[in-house]
Protein backbone atom coordinates (compact mmCIF):
# COMPACT_ATOMS: atom_id res chain seq x y z
CA UNK A 1 0.00 0.00 0.00
CA UNK A 2 1.33 3.44 -0.88
CA UNK A 3 2.21 5.91 1.83
CA UNK A 4 -0.13 8.85 1.45
CA UNK A 5 0.23 12.12 3.31
CA UNK A 6 -2.36 14.86 3.01
CA UNK A 7 -1.68 18.39 4.14
CA UNK A 8 -4.37 20.88 5.07
CA UNK A 9 -2.96 24.30 5.80
CA UNK A 10 -3.80 27.84 6.78
CA UNK A 11 -2.78 30.34 4.15
CA UNK A 12 0.76 31.56 4.84
CA UNK A 13 1.56 28.80 7.32
CA UNK A 14 4.18 27.12 5.16
CA UNK A 15 2.17 23.93 4.60
CA UNK A 16 3.17 23.66 0.95
CA UNK A 17 6.83 24.15 1.77
CA UNK A 18 6.59 21.49 4.48
CA UNK A 19 4.88 19.13 2.03
CA UNK A 20 7.56 19.64 -0.58
CA UNK A 21 10.36 18.95 1.88
CA UNK A 22 8.62 15.90 3.26
CA UNK A 23 8.04 14.51 -0.25
CA UNK A 24 11.75 14.94 -1.07
CA UNK A 25 12.73 13.33 2.20
CA UNK A 26 10.65 10.19 1.76
CA UNK A 27 11.04 10.13 -2.01
CA UNK A 28 7.34 10.54 -2.71
CA UNK A 29 5.48 12.39 -5.44
CA UNK A 30 4.32 15.90 -4.50
CA UNK A 31 0.98 17.21 -5.73
CA UNK A 32 -0.30 20.70 -5.26
CA UNK A 33 -0.96 22.98 -8.24
CA UNK A 34 -0.29 19.99 -10.49
CA UNK A 35 -3.83 18.92 -9.65
CA UNK A 36 -5.26 22.15 -10.99
CA UNK A 37 -3.28 21.78 -14.23
CA UNK A 38 -4.51 18.24 -14.66
CA UNK A 39 -8.14 19.23 -14.07
CA UNK A 40 -7.78 22.04 -16.60
CA UNK A 41 -6.42 19.61 -19.14
CA UNK A 42 -9.24 17.15 -18.64
CA UNK A 43 -12.10 19.61 -18.45
CA UNK A 44 -10.88 22.05 -21.10
CA UNK A 45 -11.30 24.89 -18.60
CA UNK A 46 -8.45 27.34 -18.15
CA UNK A 47 -6.07 26.79 -15.21
CA UNK A 48 -6.95 30.18 -13.81
CA UNK A 49 -10.62 29.38 -13.92
CA UNK A 50 -10.16 26.00 -12.24
CA UNK A 51 -7.98 27.59 -9.59
CA UNK A 52 -10.68 30.16 -8.97
CA UNK A 53 -13.28 27.44 -8.54
CA UNK A 54 -11.26 25.35 -6.10
CA UNK A 55 -10.17 28.36 -4.05
CA UNK A 56 -13.61 29.97 -3.83
CA UNK A 57 -16.62 29.02 -1.82
CA UNK A 58 -18.88 26.75 -3.85
CA UNK A 59 -21.78 28.37 -2.03
CA UNK A 60 -21.72 31.38 -4.38
CA UNK A 61 -23.40 29.21 -6.98
CA UNK A 62 -26.32 28.57 -4.67
CA UNK A 63 -29.64 30.39 -4.99
CA UNK A 64 -30.67 32.58 -2.11
CA UNK A 65 -34.42 32.29 -2.68
CA UNK A 66 -36.06 29.29 -1.10
CA UNK A 67 -38.54 29.03 -3.97
CA UNK A 68 -35.71 28.38 -6.39
CA UNK A 69 -34.20 25.45 -4.61
CA UNK A 70 -33.79 23.40 -7.81
CA UNK A 71 -31.97 26.21 -9.55
CA UNK A 72 -28.45 24.81 -8.97
CA UNK A 73 -29.25 21.90 -11.25
CA UNK A 74 -29.67 24.31 -14.12
CA UNK A 75 -26.88 26.68 -13.19
CA UNK A 76 -23.80 26.35 -15.46
CA UNK A 77 -21.49 27.78 -12.79
CA UNK A 78 -22.77 25.22 -10.33
CA UNK A 79 -22.34 22.47 -12.95
CA UNK A 80 -18.77 23.49 -13.60
CA UNK A 81 -18.02 23.54 -9.89
CA UNK A 82 -19.36 20.00 -9.64
CA UNK A 83 -17.46 18.86 -12.73
CA UNK A 84 -14.23 20.28 -11.35
CA UNK A 85 -14.75 18.61 -7.99
CA UNK A 86 -15.53 15.27 -9.60
CA UNK A 87 -12.46 15.47 -11.82
CA UNK A 88 -10.36 16.47 -8.84
CA UNK A 89 -11.73 13.48 -6.93
CA UNK A 90 -10.79 11.14 -9.78
CA UNK A 91 -7.31 12.61 -10.25
CA UNK A 92 -6.48 12.47 -6.56
CA UNK A 93 -7.52 8.82 -6.37
CA UNK A 94 -5.40 8.01 -9.41
CA UNK A 95 -2.39 9.80 -7.93
CA UNK A 96 -2.72 7.92 -4.67
CA UNK A 97 -2.78 4.60 -6.50
CA UNK A 98 0.28 5.40 -8.56
CA UNK A 99 2.94 5.86 -5.87
CA UNK A 100 3.76 7.25 -2.42
CA UNK A 101 2.62 10.84 -2.42
CA UNK A 102 2.13 14.09 -0.50
CA UNK A 103 -1.03 15.96 -1.52
CA UNK A 104 -1.63 19.53 -0.41
CA UNK A 105 -5.20 20.73 0.14
CA UNK A 106 -8.12 19.90 -2.13
CA UNK A 107 -10.03 17.76 0.37
CA UNK A 108 -7.54 14.92 -0.26
CA UNK A 109 -7.75 13.79 3.37
CA UNK A 110 -11.46 13.16 2.87
CA UNK A 111 -11.32 11.85 -0.70
CA UNK A 112 -8.69 9.28 0.28
CA UNK A 113 -10.13 8.45 3.70
CA UNK A 114 -10.37 4.76 2.88
CA UNK A 115 -6.64 4.63 2.18
CA UNK A 116 -5.99 5.93 5.70
CA UNK A 117 -3.55 8.71 4.82
CA UNK A 118 -1.46 10.47 7.42
CA UNK A 119 -3.48 13.67 7.71
CA UNK A 120 -1.55 16.78 8.68
CA UNK A 121 -2.83 20.27 9.36
CA UNK A 122 -0.38 23.17 9.38
CA UNK A 123 -1.16 26.46 11.10
CA UNK A 124 0.50 29.54 12.57
CA UNK A 125 -0.38 32.82 14.24
CA UNK A 126 -1.32 35.76 12.04
CA UNK A 127 1.96 37.61 12.53
CA UNK A 128 4.01 34.68 11.25
CA UNK A 129 1.67 34.13 8.33
CA UNK A 130 1.92 37.77 7.28
CA UNK A 131 5.71 37.57 7.54
CA UNK A 132 5.80 34.38 5.49
CA UNK A 133 3.62 35.90 2.76
CA UNK A 134 5.98 38.85 2.52
CA UNK A 135 9.08 36.62 2.47
CA UNK A 136 7.65 34.52 -0.32
CA UNK A 137 7.24 37.74 -2.24
CA UNK A 138 4.33 36.30 -4.17
CA UNK A 139 1.21 38.01 -5.39
CA UNK A 140 -0.41 37.26 -2.05
CA UNK A 141 1.05 40.42 -0.55
CA UNK A 142 0.21 42.71 -3.46
CA UNK A 143 -2.82 44.62 -4.57
CA UNK A 144 -4.10 44.27 -8.13
CA UNK A 145 -2.15 47.38 -9.13
CA UNK A 146 1.10 45.77 -7.93
CA UNK A 147 1.42 47.86 -4.77
CA UNK A 148 2.40 46.18 -1.54
CA UNK A 149 -0.50 45.51 0.84
CA UNK A 150 -0.50 46.93 4.34
CA UNK A 151 -0.55 44.40 7.18
CA UNK A 152 -4.23 45.12 7.66
CA UNK A 153 -5.03 44.45 4.01
CA UNK A 154 -2.92 41.31 3.98
CA UNK A 155 -4.58 40.05 7.14
CA UNK A 156 -7.99 40.58 5.56
CA UNK A 157 -6.87 38.71 2.46
CA UNK A 158 -5.46 35.78 4.47
CA UNK A 159 -8.68 35.50 6.45
CA UNK A 160 -10.74 35.61 3.30
CA UNK A 161 -8.75 32.87 1.59
CA UNK A 162 -9.03 30.63 4.65
CA UNK A 163 -12.74 31.32 4.95
CA UNK A 164 -13.16 30.19 1.36
CA UNK A 165 -11.09 27.08 1.94
CA UNK A 166 -13.18 26.27 4.99
CA UNK A 167 -16.43 26.66 3.08
CA UNK A 168 -15.15 24.60 0.17
CA UNK A 169 -13.95 21.84 2.49
CA UNK A 170 -17.15 21.79 4.50
CA UNK A 171 -19.30 21.77 1.40
CA UNK A 172 -17.64 18.70 -0.10
CA UNK A 173 -16.75 16.75 3.03
CA UNK A 174 -19.41 17.67 5.58
CA UNK A 175 -16.53 18.11 8.04
CA UNK A 176 -15.12 21.17 9.72
CA UNK A 177 -11.92 22.47 8.16
CA UNK A 178 -9.13 22.65 10.73
CA UNK A 179 -11.03 20.60 13.34
CA UNK A 180 -8.25 18.65 15.01
CA UNK A 181 -10.22 15.40 15.04
CA UNK A 182 -9.99 15.32 11.24
CA UNK A 183 -6.19 15.24 11.38
CA UNK A 184 -3.57 12.93 12.85
CA UNK A 185 -1.16 15.73 13.49
CA UNK A 186 -1.49 19.52 13.72
CA UNK A 187 1.69 21.49 13.43
CA UNK A 188 2.24 25.07 14.55
CA UNK A 189 4.78 26.88 12.35
CA UNK A 190 4.64 30.15 14.29
CA UNK A 191 8.13 31.57 14.52
CA UNK A 192 8.97 31.97 18.20
CA UNK A 193 11.93 34.12 19.01
CA UNK A 194 14.72 32.32 20.80
CA UNK A 195 13.04 28.96 20.36
CA UNK A 196 15.34 25.97 20.37
CA UNK A 197 12.65 23.37 20.12
CA UNK A 198 9.60 24.74 18.29
CA UNK A 199 8.27 23.58 14.96
CA UNK A 200 9.40 26.71 13.19
CA UNK A 201 12.02 24.85 11.26
CA UNK A 202 10.14 23.07 8.55
CA UNK A 203 12.92 20.66 7.67
CA UNK A 204 13.06 19.35 11.18
CA UNK A 205 9.29 19.03 11.23
CA UNK A 206 9.36 17.16 7.92
CA UNK A 207 12.04 14.88 9.30
CA UNK A 208 9.92 14.14 12.38
CA UNK A 209 6.91 13.35 10.22
CA UNK A 210 9.02 11.08 8.05
CA UNK A 211 9.79 9.08 11.17
CA UNK A 212 6.08 8.60 11.79
CA UNK A 213 5.93 6.87 8.42
CA UNK A 214 8.83 4.49 8.99
CA UNK B 1 19.48 25.31 28.23
CA UNK B 2 17.47 22.27 29.23
CA UNK B 3 15.08 20.66 26.79
CA UNK B 4 11.61 21.04 28.20
CA UNK B 5 8.54 19.31 26.82
CA UNK B 6 5.09 20.04 28.21
CA UNK B 7 2.14 17.80 27.49
CA UNK B 8 -1.48 18.90 27.68
CA UNK B 9 -3.89 16.04 27.13
CA UNK B 10 -7.52 15.10 26.94
CA UNK B 11 -8.45 12.54 29.55
CA UNK B 12 -7.99 9.03 28.16
CA UNK B 13 -5.94 10.15 25.15
CA UNK B 14 -2.72 8.50 26.26
CA UNK B 15 -0.85 11.74 26.84
CA UNK B 16 0.81 10.51 30.03
CA UNK B 17 1.93 7.29 28.36
CA UNK B 18 3.34 9.28 25.45
CA UNK B 19 5.15 11.58 27.87
CA UNK B 20 6.67 8.64 29.74
CA UNK B 21 7.94 7.03 26.56
CA UNK B 22 9.32 10.29 25.24
CA UNK B 23 11.14 10.95 28.52
CA UNK B 24 12.74 7.49 28.39
CA UNK B 25 13.71 8.00 24.78
CA UNK B 26 15.48 11.32 25.27
CA UNK B 27 16.70 10.46 28.75
CA UNK B 28 14.79 13.26 30.46
CA UNK B 29 13.06 13.44 33.82
CA UNK B 30 9.34 12.73 33.76
CA UNK B 31 6.97 14.67 36.02
CA UNK B 32 3.31 14.03 36.43
CA UNK B 33 1.85 12.96 39.77
CA UNK B 34 5.27 13.59 41.30
CA UNK B 35 4.29 17.25 41.27
CA UNK B 36 1.23 16.57 43.41
CA UNK B 37 3.33 14.60 45.90
CA UNK B 38 5.83 17.41 46.11
CA UNK B 39 3.13 20.03 46.64
CA UNK B 40 1.59 17.88 49.36
CA UNK B 41 4.95 17.61 51.09
CA UNK B 42 5.56 21.35 50.98
CA UNK B 43 2.08 22.51 51.94
CA UNK B 44 1.31 19.79 54.49
CA UNK B 45 -1.94 19.06 52.66
CA UNK B 46 -2.79 15.45 51.80
CA UNK B 47 -1.96 14.21 48.30
CA UNK B 48 -5.62 13.39 47.69
CA UNK B 49 -6.64 16.88 48.65
CA UNK B 50 -3.99 18.51 46.45
CA UNK B 51 -5.02 16.26 43.57
CA UNK B 52 -8.61 17.30 44.09
CA UNK B 53 -7.66 20.97 43.96
CA UNK B 54 -5.59 20.72 40.79
CA UNK B 55 -8.14 18.55 38.99
CA UNK B 56 -11.17 20.64 39.92
CA UNK B 57 -12.33 23.98 38.68
CA UNK B 58 -10.93 26.73 40.85
CA UNK B 59 -14.14 28.59 40.22
CA UNK B 60 -16.00 26.59 42.88
CA UNK B 61 -14.31 28.71 45.51
CA UNK B 62 -15.78 31.87 44.02
CA UNK B 63 -18.76 33.66 45.51
CA UNK B 64 -21.88 33.88 43.42
CA UNK B 65 -23.17 37.13 44.91
CA UNK B 66 -21.84 40.29 43.37
CA UNK B 67 -21.99 42.12 46.67
CA UNK B 68 -19.48 39.74 48.16
CA UNK B 69 -16.77 40.21 45.62
CA UNK B 70 -14.03 40.41 48.24
CA UNK B 71 -15.08 37.18 49.83
CA UNK B 72 -12.41 35.04 48.09
CA UNK B 73 -9.72 36.82 50.04
CA UNK B 74 -11.21 35.49 53.24
CA UNK B 75 -12.17 32.07 51.94
CA UNK B 76 -9.87 29.31 53.22
CA UNK B 77 -10.70 27.02 50.27
CA UNK B 78 -9.78 29.81 47.86
CA UNK B 79 -6.58 30.47 49.84
CA UNK B 80 -5.60 26.83 49.65
CA UNK B 81 -6.24 26.74 45.90
CA UNK B 82 -3.97 29.75 45.50
CA UNK B 83 -1.31 28.28 47.76
CA UNK B 84 -1.34 25.02 45.83
CA UNK B 85 -1.05 26.83 42.50
CA UNK B 86 1.81 28.98 43.75
CA UNK B 87 3.65 25.97 45.11
CA UNK B 88 3.05 24.14 41.84
CA UNK B 89 4.42 27.12 39.95
CA UNK B 90 7.56 27.12 42.07
CA UNK B 91 8.10 23.36 41.82
CA UNK B 92 7.65 23.29 38.04
CA UNK B 93 10.17 26.07 37.59
CA UNK B 94 12.64 24.26 39.84
CA UNK B 95 12.19 21.03 37.89
CA UNK B 96 12.75 22.77 34.57
CA UNK B 97 16.00 24.26 35.86
CA UNK B 98 17.31 20.96 37.14
CA UNK B 99 17.48 18.90 33.93
CA UNK B 100 15.81 18.01 30.64
CA UNK B 101 12.23 17.11 31.47
CA UNK B 102 8.78 16.12 30.26
CA UNK B 103 5.98 17.66 32.33
CA UNK B 104 2.40 16.47 31.98
CA UNK B 105 -0.46 18.93 32.55
CA UNK B 106 -0.53 21.49 35.38
CA UNK B 107 -0.27 24.58 33.15
CA UNK B 108 3.45 23.87 32.69
CA UNK B 109 3.34 25.19 29.10
CA UNK B 110 2.26 28.55 30.48
CA UNK B 111 4.34 28.57 33.66
CA UNK B 112 7.51 27.84 31.64
CA UNK B 113 6.64 29.99 28.63
CA UNK B 114 9.84 32.00 28.93
CA UNK B 115 11.90 28.83 28.58
CA UNK B 116 10.19 28.13 25.23
CA UNK B 117 9.24 24.51 25.88
CA UNK B 118 8.05 22.21 23.10
CA UNK B 119 4.33 22.30 23.84
CA UNK B 120 2.37 19.20 22.88
CA UNK B 121 -1.37 18.58 23.10
CA UNK B 122 -2.65 15.01 22.87
CA UNK B 123 -6.25 14.22 21.92
CA UNK B 124 -8.44 11.44 20.54
CA UNK B 125 -12.05 10.74 19.67
CA UNK B 126 -14.39 9.69 22.47
CA UNK B 127 -14.54 6.05 21.44
CA UNK B 128 -10.76 5.64 21.67
CA UNK B 129 -10.66 7.47 24.97
CA UNK B 130 -13.31 5.22 26.47
CA UNK B 131 -11.43 2.16 25.19
CA UNK B 132 -8.16 3.43 26.65
CA UNK B 133 -9.75 4.08 30.04
CA UNK B 134 -11.06 0.52 30.11
CA UNK B 135 -7.72 -0.95 29.01
CA UNK B 136 -5.89 0.93 31.72
CA UNK B 137 -8.29 -0.67 34.15
CA UNK B 138 -7.94 2.23 36.52
CA UNK B 139 -10.56 3.78 38.76
CA UNK B 140 -11.56 6.03 35.90
CA UNK B 141 -13.93 3.40 34.55
CA UNK B 142 -15.50 2.50 37.89
CA UNK B 143 -18.24 3.89 40.03
CA UNK B 144 -17.62 4.60 43.71
CA UNK B 145 -19.07 1.21 44.61
CA UNK B 146 -16.50 -0.51 42.36
CA UNK B 147 -18.93 -1.39 39.60
CA UNK B 148 -17.89 -0.86 36.00
CA UNK B 149 -19.30 2.27 34.38
CA UNK B 150 -21.42 2.07 31.26
CA UNK B 151 -20.03 3.82 28.18
CA UNK B 152 -22.49 6.64 28.79
CA UNK B 153 -21.37 7.10 32.40
CA UNK B 154 -17.72 6.94 31.40
CA UNK B 155 -18.25 9.49 28.63
CA UNK B 156 -19.91 11.84 31.11
CA UNK B 157 -16.99 11.39 33.49
CA UNK B 158 -14.38 12.03 30.77
CA UNK B 159 -16.18 15.19 29.67
CA UNK B 160 -16.42 16.39 33.24
CA UNK B 161 -12.73 15.86 33.92
CA UNK B 162 -11.78 17.73 30.74
CA UNK B 163 -14.18 20.54 31.53
CA UNK B 164 -12.50 20.93 34.91
CA UNK B 165 -9.04 20.88 33.33
CA UNK B 166 -10.13 23.52 30.85
CA UNK B 167 -11.51 25.77 33.60
CA UNK B 168 -8.42 25.31 35.73
CA UNK B 169 -6.13 26.09 32.78
CA UNK B 170 -8.12 29.10 31.70
CA UNK B 171 -8.32 30.44 35.23
CA UNK B 172 -4.57 30.42 35.77
CA UNK B 173 -3.30 31.17 32.27
CA UNK B 174 -6.00 33.30 30.66
CA UNK B 175 -5.66 31.04 27.62
CA UNK B 176 -8.02 28.51 26.11
CA UNK B 177 -7.19 24.91 26.94
CA UNK B 178 -6.70 22.84 23.79
CA UNK B 179 -6.56 25.90 21.49
CA UNK B 180 -4.02 24.84 18.89
CA UNK B 181 -2.23 28.18 18.89
CA UNK B 182 -1.07 27.45 22.43
CA UNK B 183 0.76 24.32 21.30
CA UNK B 184 3.54 23.52 18.85
CA UNK B 185 2.17 20.13 18.05
CA UNK B 186 -1.24 18.49 18.47
CA UNK B 187 -1.32 14.74 18.21
CA UNK B 188 -4.37 12.59 17.53
CA UNK B 189 -4.13 9.18 19.23
CA UNK B 190 -7.46 7.91 17.92
CA UNK B 191 -7.10 4.27 17.01
CA UNK B 192 -8.01 3.93 13.34
CA UNK B 193 -8.70 0.42 12.13
CA UNK B 194 -6.33 -0.82 9.46
CA UNK B 195 -4.19 2.29 9.79
CA UNK B 196 -0.57 1.90 8.78
CA UNK B 197 0.39 5.47 9.29
CA UNK B 198 -1.76 7.05 12.05
CA UNK B 199 -0.45 8.23 15.36
CA UNK B 200 -1.99 5.37 17.26
CA UNK B 201 1.38 3.92 18.07
CA UNK B 202 2.65 6.07 20.85
CA UNK B 203 6.23 4.87 20.60
CA UNK B 204 6.45 5.96 17.01
CA UNK B 205 4.92 9.28 17.90
CA UNK B 206 7.39 9.71 20.76
CA UNK B 207 10.22 8.86 18.42
CA UNK B 208 9.04 11.47 15.93
CA UNK B 209 8.83 14.10 18.66
CA UNK B 210 12.31 13.18 19.83
CA UNK B 211 13.54 14.02 16.35
CA UNK B 212 12.03 17.48 16.67
CA UNK B 213 14.29 18.00 19.66
CA UNK B 214 17.51 16.88 17.99
Image (cartoon, coloured by chain):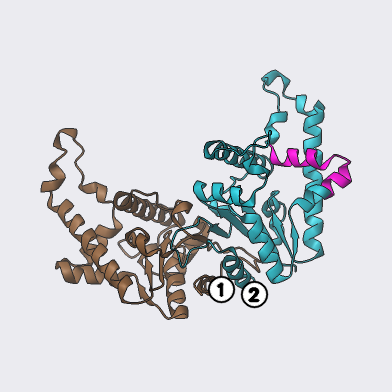
Chain colours: A brown, B cyan
Say if mark 1 contacts mark 2, CB within 8 Å.
yes
Please say whether residue B40 is one of the residues in the magenta stretch.
yes
- Overall secondary structure of the magenta section: helix
Q: Residue at point 42% right, 74% down?
A: A20
Dot 1: few (<14), some (14–19), or many (≥20) neighbours within 10 Å?
many
Q: How many numbered marks have been drawn onto this rendered protein structure?
A: 2
Question: In the rendered view, does A201 fall on the left or right side of A157?
Answer: right
Please say whether residue A28 is one of the residues in the magenta stretch.
no
Residue A38, image x and y in percent? 23, 71
In the rendered structure, which segment of residues is drawn in magenta? B38-56
| Residue on which disc 2 sits | B214
| Residue on which disc 1 sits | A204
Farthest-out residue, left: A74
Q: Residue at point 69% right, 49% down?
A: B107
Q: Are marks 1 and 2 on the same chain?
A: no
The front one of A104 and A98 is A98
Chain at tag 2:
B
Amino acid sequence: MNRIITIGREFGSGGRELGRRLAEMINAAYYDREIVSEIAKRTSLSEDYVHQIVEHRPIVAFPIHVGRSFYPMLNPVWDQGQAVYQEQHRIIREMAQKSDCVIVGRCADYILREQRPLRIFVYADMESRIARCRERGEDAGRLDNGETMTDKELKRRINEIDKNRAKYYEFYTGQTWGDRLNYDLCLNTTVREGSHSGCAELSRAASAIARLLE
